[in-house]
Image (cartoon, grey):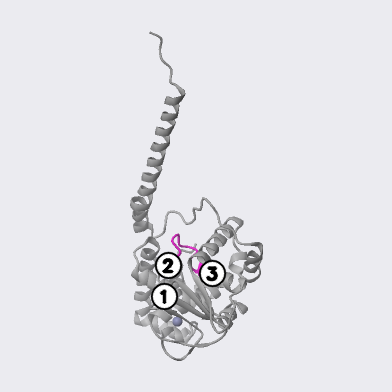
Amino acid sequence: MLPSYPTTMENSYTLLAVLIWLAIGFYFGLFFINRILEPLYIYIFRRPIYLYWYPVIKKLSPERQKILTDNVPFYRRLSPQHKKYFEHRVVGFLESYQFYGKNELVVTDEIYVMIASAYVMLTFGMRLFKTNVFNKIIIYPDSYQSTISNKLHNGEFNPQLKAIVFSWNHFKRGYLKGDDNLNLGIHEFTHALHQHGLRRGDQSAIIFADRYARIMKEVKHPPNAQRLIDSEYFRIYAYTNDYEFLAVILEHFFETPHVFEKEFPQLFQNVKRMINYR
Ligand SMILES: [Zn+2]
């Protein structure tokens, strides 16, 4: 009897079987990396295995890209590849959160891009950078009456409404002078990140919470606490409570990193690791 050769039909079955095995292998590979290898890696090294992996990169329109280039020094300093990741995240942010203009404020491209970029910058060292502790951004043209305190506010994180609220006028001021340690965007988004870090269990939150606990332990050690106050580097508002302290030190981290590192090297390193900055 002549040896039989595979028919075309058998070939396509073989191809299908190979594809199915590849898909199963890919799935278990991802499962292994995300559920077993990475938690172990995070436990040991306190950082994610990888930060950016986007098979399809989302792009900003040239107009919106120009807003980033013109106004965000952090973006300008990135490598071409990291600029793409940054833009991808800005687009992802804008797709995930609703923006509402109040008191007849029209949400312009500049408002969309600048607010998204503040959040993306703060979380650029995290792989899982989005959070569900807020789902909307409310923007007033200027200071507004807060529903929490009934006082005039320039910005807030309202966990009940799941909202971040900004006075656009004050948000913009954060960028006019890049080294005055005042940045409303970073400040309010840090409040949200703080809550996310302490309440959620994803890998970014685990890294954040671990380092945050260390920071608070060190700054509450009486001699350290006194040195912080005496130095007058952080504005006095930082000592209102733990939430405000964290928000203010993150403003300093992005506005005057060199001074921060020189004044409080250990605190600076802990903040850096908390948000996984290199
Ligand atoms: Zn605050």
Q: Which residue is mark 2?
A: 131
Q: Position of residue 168 (x, y in %)?
A: 57, 80
Amino acid type shown at disc 3: Ala
Q: How many marks?
A: 3
Seen in the image, is 3 located left or right of residue 173?
Answer: left
Seen in the image, is 151 located left or right of residue 206?
Answer: right
Task: Quarter of the image for the N terminus: give it.
Answer: top left
| SS state under label 1 | loop
Amino acid type shown at disc 2: Thr
Q: How many C-alpha atoms fall within 10 Å of the one at disc 3: few (<14), some, or many (≥20)? A: many
Q: Which residue is mark 1?
A: 162
Given the current orientation, which residue lies at the most extreme bottom position? 151
Range covered by the magenta-colored residues:
116-131
Q: State how far apart marks 1 and 3 are (Cα).
A: 16 Å
Q: Position of residue 73 (x, y in %)?
A: 61, 69
Q: State how far apart marks 1 and 2 are (Cα).
A: 11 Å
Q: Quadrant of ligand 1?
A: bottom left
| SS state under label 3 | helix
Seen in the image, is 202 located left or right of residue 178?
Answer: left
Q: Which residue is mark 3?
A: 116
Amino acid type shown at disc 1: Lys
